[in-house]
Amino acid sequence: MANLNSSQLQNWNNNGFLKIPRYFTTNEIEEIQQWVLEISSWEPINDKWMHHYESTPDGPRLSRTENFVPFHDNMRMTVTSGKVIKIVSELMTEPTVLYKEKINYKYPGGGGYAAHQDAPAYEFIDFHITCLISVDSATPDSGCLYFASGRHQEGFIALDEKGCVSPETAVTMSWQPVPTKPGDILLFGSYIPHKSPPNHSNEPRRIIYLTYNAKSQGDWREKYYADKREAFSQYAADSSKRDKQISKIAHFRGNIIENAEFD
Ligand SMILES: O=C(O)CCC(=O)C(=O)O
């Protein structure tokens, strides 16, 4: 087991999130950075991995890639066995299975995320734990995460029509920035409110998000992606403009665009 110490467990229970600096060695994170480069260079093939693009001051850029685990052996091994699953299972207090995965690239000028909880977007299962791997440095300037520390035990908080925490409630919350460096991980449950600003720096802010659920609740990963594809094909056919979202909740504040031509 990863053997979290009592102060780490206390932080997890009290705050609803836990940062572990340098969980990956320099060599390991350099490999992961290489894999992220490989994945980001894949051509868009919509029935395989899901690339999402956004408009930035430097032109169209990748905003997110989802569903890459079946297509990248090294990444699959890293996220379905070994030290990530170990630490998540320790926090879950039982074995866990991958529910979904994504890379958020947040290139310079890339959009931020409104205050939200993940639970409304993560259906079929009540509780998830996400392990974020910092691929680049994430700072308040480049768009690191901010958490409403301790607010994870209140169920859904002021859920609005976008599936987010209503702006009126979000402004009353106390927000703690949690900067990360390459190789750091940050673990958080699906009820902790969080948000992030746009990337105002000149450097990419790439982060991998690995979301798990208790294995005893079943393996929902394929169902999650099938459901998301189905929902987005319906959004594209109706006039709701929800196909311009990045998720079933409307938390992304950047501008999503169709599959883009790259220079
Ligand atoms: O990558 C970020 O800045 C925040 C992402 C996030 O909260 C999400 O994708 O739900």
Image (cartoon, rainbow, N blue to C red):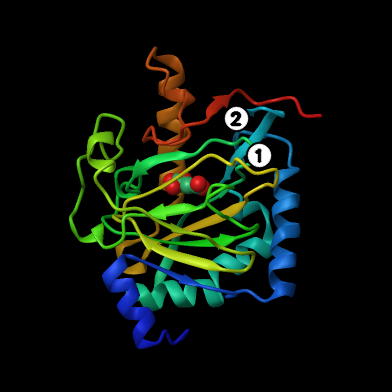
Q: Residue at x 26, y 63 (%)?
A: 150
Q: Which mark is residue 108?
A: 1
Q: Element under label 1?
A: loop
Image quarter (top left, top right, bottom left or bottom right) of the C terminus: top right
Q: Is the C-beta of the residue carrying label 1 under 8 Å from the nearest atom of ligand 1?
A: no
Where is residue 51 shown, x and y percent of the image?
61, 37
* Residue corresponding to mark 2: 54
Where is residue 20 shown, x and y percent of the image?
50, 74
Residue 191 seen in the figure: yes
Q: Residue at x 52, y 51 (%)?
A: 140
Q: Is the C-beta of the residue carrying label 2 under 8 Å from the nearest atom of ligand 1?
A: no
Query: Is 126 placed above or below 248 here?
Result: below
- Distance Cα–Cα, label 1 vs label 2: 11 Å
Residue 93 seen in the figure: no
**Mark 2 neighbour density, 10 Å: few (under 14) some (14–19) many (20 or more):** many
Q: Residue furthest right?
A: 263
Q: Residue at x 46, y 24 (%)?
A: 243
Where is residue 23 shown, x and y percent of the image?
57, 75
Callout 1, which amino acid?
Pro
**Mark 1 neighbour density, 10 Å: few (under 14) some (14–19) many (20 or more):** many
Q: Residue at x 35, y 53 (%)?
A: 175
